[in-house]
Amino acid sequence: MTSIPGPGRDRLPSLTGLRFWAALLVVLYHLSRQVGTVPFLSEAVWYGRSGVTFFFVLSGVVLAWTYDGARVPAKVFLWRRFARIWPLLAVSVGVSVAVWAVMDHPVSLKAVAATLLAVHAWFPQPVMFTGGNPAAWSLSDEAFFYLLFPALLALLAGRRARVWLWTAVAVTGAALVLWPSLSGLSPATRGWALDYLPLTRALQFVLGVVAGLALKRGWRPPLPLWAAASLVMGWHLALIPWSHAVPDALWYSPYTASQWLSAPIFAALICAAARADLDGRRTGLGGAWMIRLGHWSFAWYLLHEIVIRAAVFTWGRPAPGDATLLFWAGVLAVSLTAAAAAYHGVEHPAERRLRRAGPSVPRPDRPEHPEPRASVGAR
């Protein structure tokens, strides 16, 4: 096994750059469905909600890479994750509720409380897991993953490579079995169980954890970055004719498949990008601006739907054609600017203050650098 340098912020810069592209996929998905379509581009991103699956896998990879061998107590790890996601979650919920109020849209106080406690995705009622800030449902899943992670690391770290391989096969196989197994449920319950429920989505996180452990031990993924990227693009393009043939209401439609079956493909992309960084190869994803955009991606993920909602309420849906493109451009510019301000004004400084105020690792064991970012949208 090759020796891997220790972790640090942006130690794997291509993963930070990839975060921006995954967030963009989610943003374009919402623009297509909530504002209006752009020929071909909207078809290609019609199931761009799969970007959340990317972030779930990425979280597992980055956390395993960062904490394997670091001997960080669970309470320190969990405090760091709280400091990482909660301040911006709280701010985004406040902004979202304010926009709902301007729209005279009723807001469930129970849903807002559940969102702030990051437990809302456990409830099957749509008003609960989309209340407050609808985009924040994924943070409920992430919070569950963080609670699982110390036990997962203790169970899997130090194992032989074949244990990681069989774990990856098991969680991928479980996803393939669960998808048709839940077909007898009502569409609403099935959608919640497969798309939102933290327990089922944890399969994607576990896949990321074993991939991260393997990378830390020097594993070389079989696909180069260009091939893995082509596989991801090919998968999303293949969803276009599938969507024309099968309505989304059916269990075997591409709506759930795009999120549920894409985890191994995203894992291949993440591992290929990480391996390229470790080998010192340029990827086009680790430049200064790509890293900056990657840092803003968590805030962008949490804020973009609020901007879309406010814009549609204020101006209505644009006419097809150039008006839709102009509307898209305006939303992209405003939401990304808001994300940059939120990152520099709230997310980053709040995380630093909370980390200093919370429990810490005894000095001899303290990592030299802060951990890389992996939350959804940052996610």
Image: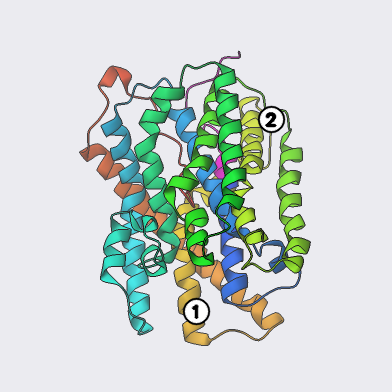
Instruction: Identify residue for label 1.
Output: 311
Helix, strand or loop at mark 1: helix
* Residue 261 marker: none
Is 113 located above or below residue 4 in the figure? below
Q: Would residue 8 be counted in the magenta stretch?
A: yes
Rendering coords of residue 263 (x, y %)? 60, 44
Q: Which span is picked out in magenta?
A: 1-16
Rendering coords of residue 158 (x, y %)? 47, 16
Residue at horizontal 53 percent and vertical 29 percent from the top: 210
Helix, strand or loop at mark 2: loop
| Front one among 290 and 302 | 302
Residue type of the residue flagged with mark 1? Ala
Residue at horizontal 33 percent and vertical 60 percent from the top: 115
Quadrant location of the N terminus?
top right
* Residue 281 marker: 2
Rendering coords of residue 287 (x, y %)? 61, 42
Is 184 located above or below residue 101 in the figure? above
